């Protein structure tokens, strides 16, 4: 993404380093949630959000890793739906059966029992939840004046109403930051990924396996299901946590304000995410976490830096995406990555 004349079609080329021994990275910590003993009761029908300090392995965002029950370990009818937001590093749980008003529930975060156990929470390098972290989050559902005995004040399990317009919100970011003639535009786009028109995005990005995935040496063998990036699509509609594009973008340090042409002005003093979607303040990835990601993703960050020998986020010819822009792309993918014919 991005680049200057002379960068040529090498925008996404690079060397993947040997990843650390599987599971030896820094442990995962729960750093925030919109539920808990000290939080206001969860309104009936609302989703549950858990925030972590590390990027999580998409394959482990399952009902076997995040178990929603009442205090007697009964599951609430239809199992919940889970989504992962790699920008906010948030696991979002959508109950499919209404949680009962005035009742207490819990989310249990499961730890794998062995290096080959595919069930349980893991970071992208296989690290597990810090054993000092309480793996159980208890919370109460609000009684709610309008909620019935079944907690049905709002429709349980309802995903967010689509909020991202491809033509007015996503396409300006892509054209400004990604689709230059030296990278992902023109007749010879880098890695065959062309992003300079809706038709090109639909043809070369949606559902197509990234050239840089499933490559590079591994310091230890592990089940294929636990390999980060294994045959990962560039964009997997509905699943930003399994979209290679999101991790290429996350390798760059986001600036405070946007330089995208036509973008709304922003206030550098107000951190947060698009439309206050998330309840917790967002914290940038640490240098070590970004380095871990860089070891597992072939090539440089996107937009491509003008000086490929510079450290991550340094020497950028085109400014990286801001936090708001990252969330815009993330939410577009989450909403199914629709590609419209723009005028």
Image (cartoon, helix red, strand yellow):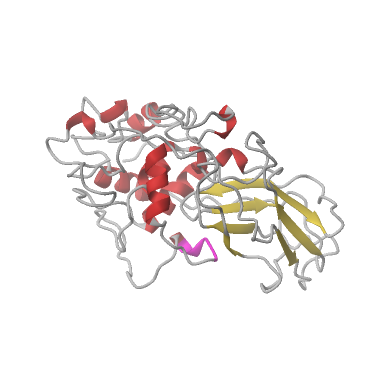
Q: How many marks?
A: 0
In the rendered structure, the answer to whether residue 126 lies left or right of residue 19 reads: right
Q: Quadrant of the N terminus?
A: top left
Residue 161 location, x and y as percent?
56, 52
Which secondary structure dominates the residues rendered in magenta? loop
Residue 249 among magenta residues: no
Residue 113 image-quadrant placement: top right
Query: Is residue 200 among the parts visible in the rendering?
Result: yes
In the rendered structure, the answer to whether residue 165 lies left or right of residue 315 reads: right
Residue 80 location, x and y as percent?
71, 47
Residue 242 location, x and y as percent?
50, 38
In the picture shown, does residue 263 fall above or below 174?
A: below
Residue 254 location, x and y as percent?
33, 56
What is the span of residues highlighted in magenta in the rendered image?
A: 275-279
Q: Nearer the viewer, residue 262 or 210?
A: 210
In the rendered structure, the answer to whether residue 57 lies left or right of residue 47 reads: left
């Amino acid at each position: 993404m991005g680049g200057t004349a002379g960068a040529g079609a090498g925008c996404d080329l690079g060397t993947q380093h040997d990843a650390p021994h599987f599971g030896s990275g820094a442990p995962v910590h729960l750093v925030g949630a919109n539920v808990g003993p000290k939080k206001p009761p969860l309104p009936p029908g609302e989703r549950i959000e858990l925030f972590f300090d590390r990027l999580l392995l998409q394959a482990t965002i399952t009902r076997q890793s995040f178990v929603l029950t009442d205090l007697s370990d009964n599951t609430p009818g239809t199992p919940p739906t889970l989504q992962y937001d790699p920008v906010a590093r948030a696991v979002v749980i959508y109950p499919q059966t209404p949680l009962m008003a005035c009742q207490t529930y819990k989310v249990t975060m499961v730890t794998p029992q062995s290096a080959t156990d595919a069930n349980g929470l893991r970071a992208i390098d296989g690290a597990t939840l810090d054993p000092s972290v309480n793996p159980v989050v208890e919370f109460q559902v609000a009684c709610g004046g309008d909620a019935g005995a079944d907690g049905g004040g709002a429709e349980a399990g309802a995903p967010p109403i689509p909020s991202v317009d491809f033509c007015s919100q996503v396409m300006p970011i892509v054209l400004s930051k990604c689709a230059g003639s030296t990278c992902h535009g023109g007749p010879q786009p880098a890695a065959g990924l062309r992003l300079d028109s809706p038709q090109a995005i639909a043809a070369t990005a949606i559902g197509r396996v990234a050239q840089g995935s499933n490559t590079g040496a591994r310091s230890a063998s592990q089940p294929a299901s636990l390999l980060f990036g294994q045959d990962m699509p560039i964009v997997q509609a509905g699943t930003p946590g399994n979209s290679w594009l999101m991790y290429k973008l996350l390798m760059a340090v986001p600036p405070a304000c946007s330089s995208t042409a036509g973008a709304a002005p922003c206030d550098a003093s107000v951190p947060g995410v698009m439309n206050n979607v998330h309840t917790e303040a967002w914290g940038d990835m640490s240098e070590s976490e970004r380095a871990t990601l860089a070891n597992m993703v072939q090539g440089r960050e996107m937009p491509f830096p003008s000086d490929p020998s510079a450290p991550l986020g340094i020497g950028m010819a085109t400014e990286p995406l801001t936090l708001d822009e990252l969330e815009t792309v993330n939410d577009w993918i989450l909403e199914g990555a629709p590609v419209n014919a723009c005028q």
